[in-house]
Image: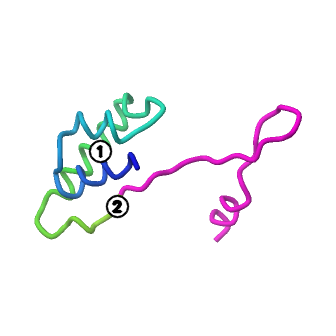
Amino acid sequence: MAALVVDDYVRYGTGTLDTAMARGFSHGFGDFAANRGLVAWMREYIGGPGRADTFRIVAVRKVSVRRKRGGRGRPAPAQLACLAA
């Protein structure tokens, strides 16, 4: 899972920022300066000893339920249930 590349970089300093951005994001999201700045900030924030468990990086993916005759999808029921909790 791509997000684990970013998680390992942020929490443990594994690899480089460039590698985390290139391999840890899909759909070109690693190219956004704001995402790069956020990942760099998270690494700097967690960089101290004993802080690796401060937070984790996980994948976020929008899953849609497609309509039969085109049109835009709507969020899957499981996503809606998580948001409501």
Residue 30 placement (x, y as % from top left): 37, 33
Residue 56 tag number:
2
For this orientation, the residue located farthest to the left is 49
- What segment carries the magenta color? 57-85
Q: Which mark is residue 7?
A: none
Q: How many residues crowd around disc 2 within 10 Å: few (fewer than 14), some, or many (20 or more)?
A: few
Three-letter amino acid code at the position of disc 1: Val
Q: Earlier in the sequence, mark 1 or mark 2?
A: 1
Q: Nearer the viewer, residue 83 or 16?
A: 16
> Residue 23 location, x and y as percent?
33, 37
Height in image: 57 above or below 65? below
Tell me the quarter of the picture where residue 76 sits.
Answer: bottom right
Identify residue type, mark 2.
Arg
What residue is disc 1 on? 39
Please indicate whether residue 77 sits to the left or right of residue 44 in the image.
Answer: right
Residue 73: horizontal and vertical position, in percent? 76, 41
- The residue lying at 28 percent from left, 67 percent from top is 54
